[in-house]
Amino acid sequence: MSRPRSFETFRQSDLVTISELVQLSGLRYSTLKYYVESGLLPFEQLDTGLVRRYPRVAALERLAEIKVCKEEYKMTIQQIIARFKGETYADRP
């Protein structure tokens, strides 16, 4: 079993695990899992150990967009899901 990566290591990684994304974003694990299951937070499935990885920069940008939708535009989670429906990180400018 491999050792967990240090904060500094995964803070600069291209791909991070959901646990690492929890530490980077400050959001709860259950919140991120809900976003994943809702399709708001796309991931890449790696063959090794079937670990899901999230593009660090794109995932943090998406989380920031979700926060703006919730806090500034007072959108419900269903409205946010509809807003991002079918959109991947690659679809963003």
Image: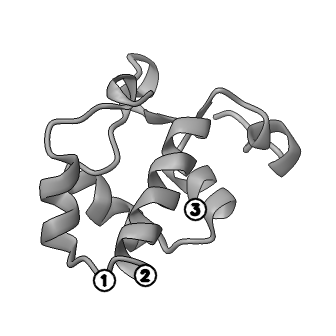
Q: Is residue 73 left or right of residue 61?
A: left
Give the residue at x 23% y 35%. 87
Q: Are marks 2 and 3 in contact (CB under 8 Å)?
A: no
Name the residue that disc number 3 marks.
22
Amino acid type shown at disc 1? Lys
Whole-angstrom CA distance, mark 3 to mark 1, is 23 Å
Disc 2 versus disc 1: distance between alpha carbons? Answer: 5 Å
Residue nearer the viewer, 63 or 28: 63
Dot 1 lies on which element?
loop
Nearer the observer, 3 or 87: 87
Q: Are marks 2 and 1 in contact (CB under 8 Å)?
A: yes
Quadrant of the snapshot with the N terminus: top right
Q: Is residue 3 left or right of residue 52?
A: right
Q: Quadrant of residue 70?
A: bottom left
Which sits in the foreground, 45 or 61?
A: 61
Report which residue position mark 2 lands on: 71
Up-down relation of residue 82 to residue 34 (above or below) = above
Three-letter amino acid code of the residue under disc 3 = Val
Residue at x-position 39% and y-position 63%: 66
Residue 17, by quadrant, is top right
Drawn side of residue 34 relative to residue 48, left or right:
left
Label 1: how many residues lie within 10 Å, few (<14), some (14-19) or many (20+)? few
Query: Residue at label 1?
Result: 74
Label 2 SS: helix
Tell me residue 27's x, y (percent).
Answer: 54, 71
First in residue order: circle 2 vs circle 3? 3
Image quarter where the C terminus lies is top left
In the rendered view, tell whether residue 56 sits above or below residue 67: above
The quarter of the picture where residue 79 lies is: bottom left
Locate residue 13, reporting x and y percent.
72, 30
Label whose residue precedes the other's in the sequence (3 or 1): 3
